[in-house]
Image (cartoon, helix red, strand yellow):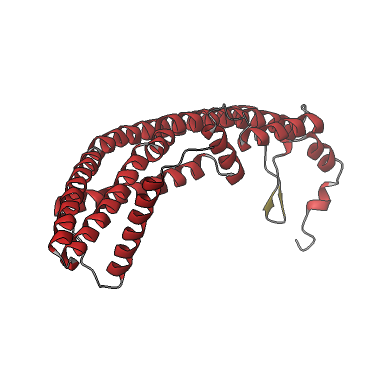
């Protein structure tokens, strides 16, 4: 059987009730509220803005890196349980695989089939580059920011909440001192007030120290931001190189021939497709002549 300390239970219940009464009276305008000093207020406002915008930046960055919401949730779950997230192909890689399969099925020796295979292979290269970018961006940017929210920011919020509770205790004691009717009751209330003031001041100092540490966190976030930009620039540079190489490859295999003009419309160059050659050479020349001339 568990050993309950009845006195502590009663004391804790009394504290909770006292705080609830104080909070209610403040909301109703029936009780004064101890104001924090201006510096602490400024630090708390900076912390609130840091939390809000860091959450938004992380959320939007992850949406860019992993557009599929289901995949994002799955990755977050694996991260929380500290297990390696499942490896999945990128959309570009799936596109590339389908192109290669289509080109092989339609005929790798045909112009279209051969081009499908070649483009599909390059799309797979792009997909691999994209996957590497997503992993690197996560490691250097989104993961550190999310870790900040889950550790430092939670610690600040915890101490901030404790400070608010100590403030409620302090103001409740101030009210008891004002309402004390007897000398004995006033002495007891003043003793409680001194204790509450001391605990509030101590908690305010602890909270202030944590809030001042946000400057160091901002400096770390700045480094992560620079690393993200470098990673992104490298990603786009690699993509540009791949696409430039692909264009060069396609140009080298595409030799344009003379253009046939039929009813003022340009058709595909004849030499690029033997089926066009066979079809048009089987039609008498007079078929292309304008009967009005």
Q: Is residue 193 above or below residue 242?
A: below
Quadrant where the image shows the N terminus: top right
Q: Residue at x 52, y 34 (%)?
A: 80
Depth check: give the residue in front, 7 or 116. Answer: 7
- For the point 30% across and 73% down, the residue is 28
Q: Is residue 279 left or right of residue 169?
A: right
Q: How many marks?
A: 0
258 w.r.t. 165: above or below: above
Front residue of this view, candidates 214 and 69? 214
Q: Is residue 149 above or below residue 164?
A: above
Q: Is residue 36 among the parts visible in the rendering?
A: no
Instruction: Tell me if residue 87 comes above or below residue 209 in the rendering.
Output: above
Whole-percent x and y of residue 140? 40, 30
**Image check: 148 left or right of 39?**
right
Residue 130 rendering spot, x and y as whole percentages: 53, 32
- Residue 24: percent from the left, percent from the top? 33, 67
Q: Residue 73: x and y, percent?
A: 57, 42
> Is 153 left or right of 104, judged from the image as shown?
left
Horizontal side of 59 relative to 152 (left or right) equals right
Residue 83 seen in the current view: yes
Query: Looking at the image, which is closer to me, 179 or 275?
Result: 179
Q: Residue at x 48, y 41 (%)?
A: 62
Specify the quadrant of the image occupied by residue 97.
top right
Image quarter of the C terminus: bottom right
What residue is at 67 percent from the left and 39 percent from the top? 258
Nearest to the observer: residue 37 or residue 232: 37
Q: Residue 91 falls in which quadrant of the image?
A: top right
């Amino acid at each position: 059987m568990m050993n309950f300390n009845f006195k502590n239970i009663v004391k804790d219940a009394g504290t909770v009730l006292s705080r609830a009464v104080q909070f209610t009276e403040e909301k109703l305008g029936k009780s004064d509220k101890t104001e924090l000093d201006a510096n602490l207020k400024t630090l708390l406002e900076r912390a609130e803005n840091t939390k809000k915008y860091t959450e938004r930046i992380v959320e939007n960055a992850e949406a860019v890196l992993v557009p599929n919401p289901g995949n994002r949730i799955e990755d977050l779950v694996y991260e929380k349980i500290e297990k390696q997230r499942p490896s999945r192909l990128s959309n570009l890689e799936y596109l590339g695989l389908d192109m290669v399969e289509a080109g092989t099925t339609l005929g790798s020796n045909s112009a279209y089939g051969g081009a499908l295979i070649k483009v599909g292979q390059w799309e797979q290269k792009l997909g691999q580059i994209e996957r590497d970018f997503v992993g690197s961006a996560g490691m250097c940017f989104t993961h550190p920011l999310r870790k900040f929210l889950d550790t430092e920011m939670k610690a600040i919020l915890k101490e901030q909440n404790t400070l608010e509770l100590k403030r409620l205790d302090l103001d409740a004691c101030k009210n008891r001192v004002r309402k004390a009717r007897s000398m004995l009751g006033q002495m007891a209330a003043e003793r409680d007030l001194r204790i509450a003031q001391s605990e509030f001041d101590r908690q305010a100092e602890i909270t202030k120290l944590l809030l001042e540490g946000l400057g160091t966190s901002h400096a770390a976030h700045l480094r992560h931001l620079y690393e993200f930009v470098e990673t992104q620039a490298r990603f786009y540079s690699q993509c540009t190189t791949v696409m430039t190489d692909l264009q060069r490859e396609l140009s080298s295999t595409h030799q344009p021939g003379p253009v046939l003009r039929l009813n003022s419309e340009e058709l595909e160059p004849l030499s690029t497709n033997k089926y066009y050659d066979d079809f048009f050479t089987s039609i008498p020349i007079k078929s292309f002549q304008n009967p009005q001339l």
